């Protein structure tokens, strides 16, 4: 125990001991702790005068949402009453009874059987199917072309990189309307059926569209299709198993060739078991046009090519940005380990780049689907074209426009949901 105090000189000229200094420091610390406890005590945070429910942040948040919902409902009710009053003043009936009335107009292109005696509802359904045909094929082709051009832009090959750069800069900066009109003009300037261009035996390009041979219908093709689906599922499971095996043991198992064998071999085996039926429906020139095979109208071909070329340019930029977002040091490290370029792209670059690529690519898919409505400019019978015809004949403007809005909204939500699920699937999992 210290019995003597060590004197310290202070600014005032007096002396105080080291013990006094420590005691004073302890008193200051205890007073600061007590002040902190007073400030952080839950029963003393809110002053006594602020205990009202109207000062609660949770209450204000709920109240604002209720007021906004009420404002939206009242605004919609006002618009509904106003529209009904204007329609009654003009003598225009409302309702959905026109769905069952005869349409009375033909549709130049339909994936299902349609007659002018069918109802307006069936005609609108044909328009929905035609829109889905363009969107589905366009998304697949735009993805393939966009990914190829995006990878080409990052290639070390100077010529390939510059060609991809020119494509992206030209197609991305030209409005999509001009793309559709340009390709429609190109198709219209193709030769007549008698001078049709033949890219391969049985296929013909002409100003009336594209025709090519298809196999004749046979019950065996149903089983071939089932076998193909099973082959795709089997190839996916094989790839997942090989990936888990590589993560567990570090041993790489090539699955590409085996996957191709499964995807091609199962349908081929099903086709052989069913007797290998194969007869072709080859188009032939009869009169002024070709008969047989499968024909794609010039409007459909121009619309698909136009929206595909335009959207693929944006997807290419997204892919390029995703690849370049991967730190270059990781790629150099993979090269230093002796990995082949395709392994670097598959295992190092793309898993990280997909986090950047997938969300904006989903937006491009939505834009392509909505841009398919431009088919009305070149006479393609999509939903907007048939909806406008229905509107003009029935006068049901509100109902026709509402149907088109609901259909495009449903398609967009479906694409967004699928892409969100895919984004979760390819996301890098933390260990």
Image (spheres, grey):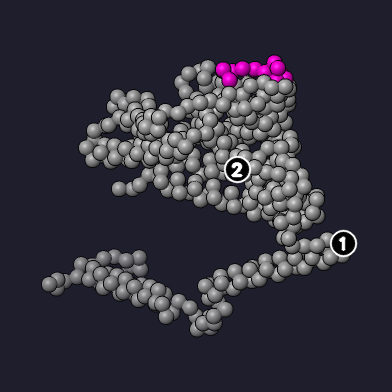
Query: In front: 400, or 427?
Result: 400
Q: Is residue 25 visible?
A: yes
For disc 1, the neighbor class at 10 Å (few under 14, some 14 to 19, many from 20) is few
- Counting from the top left corner in percent of width and height, residue 90 is at 87, 61
Query: In front: 129, or 351?
Result: 129
Q: Quadrant of residue 253?
A: top left
- Residue of label 1: 90
User: Marks 1 and 2, Cα distance to the nearest angstrom?
Assistant: 36 Å
Q: Which mark is residue 3?
A: none
Q: Is residue 333 visible?
A: no
Q: For mark 1, give the secondary structure.
A: loop
Query: In front: 144, or 260?
Result: 260
Q: Residue at x 63, y 51 (%)?
A: 407
Q: Residue at x 35, y 47 (%)?
A: 429
Q: Quadrant of residue 265?
A: top left
Return the disc, 1 or 2, that comes first in the chain's sequence: 1
What span is colored magenta in the figure? 191-202
- Counting from the top left corner in percent of width and height, residue 353 is at 44, 37
- Residue of label 2: 132
- Counting from the top left corner in percent of width and height, residue 403 is at 68, 54
**View extreme (right): residue:** 90
Q: Vertically, is 427 above or below 277?
A: below
The answer to whether 174 appears left or right of 212 in the picture is right
Residue 57 inside the magenta-drawn segment:
no
Query: In front: 217, or 251?
Result: 217
The answer to whether 92 appears left or right of 317 in the picture is right
């Amino acid at each position: 125990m210290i019995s003597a105090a060590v004197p310290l000189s202070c600014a005032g000229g007096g002396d105080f001991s080291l013990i006094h200094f420590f005691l004073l420091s302890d008193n200051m610390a205890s007073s600061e702790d007590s002040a902190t406890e007073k400030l952080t005590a839950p029963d003393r945070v809110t002053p006594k005068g602020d205990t009202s429910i109207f000062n609660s942040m949770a209450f204000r948040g709920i109240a604002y949402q209720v007021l906004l919902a009420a404002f939206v409902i009242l605004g919609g009710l006002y618009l509904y009453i106003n529209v009904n009053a204007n329609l009654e003043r003009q003598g225009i009936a409302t309702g959905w009874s026109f769905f069952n009335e005869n349409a009375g107009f033909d549709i130049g292109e339909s994936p299902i059987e349609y007659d002018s005696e069918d109802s307006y509802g069936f005609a609108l359904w044909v328009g929905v199917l035609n829109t889905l045909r363009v969107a589905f094929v366009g998304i697949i082709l735009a993805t393939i072309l966009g990914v190829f051009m995006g990878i080409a832009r990052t290639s070390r090959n100077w010529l390939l990189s510059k060609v991809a750069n020119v494509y992206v800069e030209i197609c991305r900066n030209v409005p999509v309307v001009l793309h559709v009109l340009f390709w429609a003009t190109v198709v219209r300037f193709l030769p007549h059926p008698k001078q049709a261009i033949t890219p391969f035996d049985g296929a013909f390009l002409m100003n009336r569209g594209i025709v090519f041979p298809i196999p004749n219908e046979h019950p065996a093709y149903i089983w071939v299709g089932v076998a193909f689906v099973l082959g795709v599922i089997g190839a996916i499971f094989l790839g997942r198993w090989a990936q888990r095996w590589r993560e567990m043991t570090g041993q790489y198992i090539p699955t590409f060739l085996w996957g191709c064998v499964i995807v091609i071999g199962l349908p081929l085996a099903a086709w052989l078991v069913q007797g290998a039926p194969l007869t072709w429906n080859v188009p032939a020139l009869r009169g002024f046009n070709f008969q047989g095979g499968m024909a794609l109208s010039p409007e459909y071909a121009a619309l698909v090519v136009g929206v595909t070329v335009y959207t693929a340019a944006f997807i290419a930029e997204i892919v390029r940005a995703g690849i370049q977002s991967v730190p270059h040091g990781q790629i150099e490290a993979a090269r230093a380990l002796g990995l082949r370029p395709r392994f670097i792209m598959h295992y190092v670059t793309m898993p990280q780049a997909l986090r950047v690529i997938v969300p904006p690519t989903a937006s491009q898919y939505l834009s392509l689907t909505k841009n398919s409505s431009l088919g009305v400019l070149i006479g393609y019978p999509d939903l907007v074209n048939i909806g406008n015809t229905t509107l003009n004949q029935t006068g049901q403007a509100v109902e026709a426009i509402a149907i088109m809005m609901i259909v495009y909204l449903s398609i967009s939500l479906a694409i967004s949901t699928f892409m969100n699920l895919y984004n979760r699937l390819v996301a890098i999992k933390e260990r």
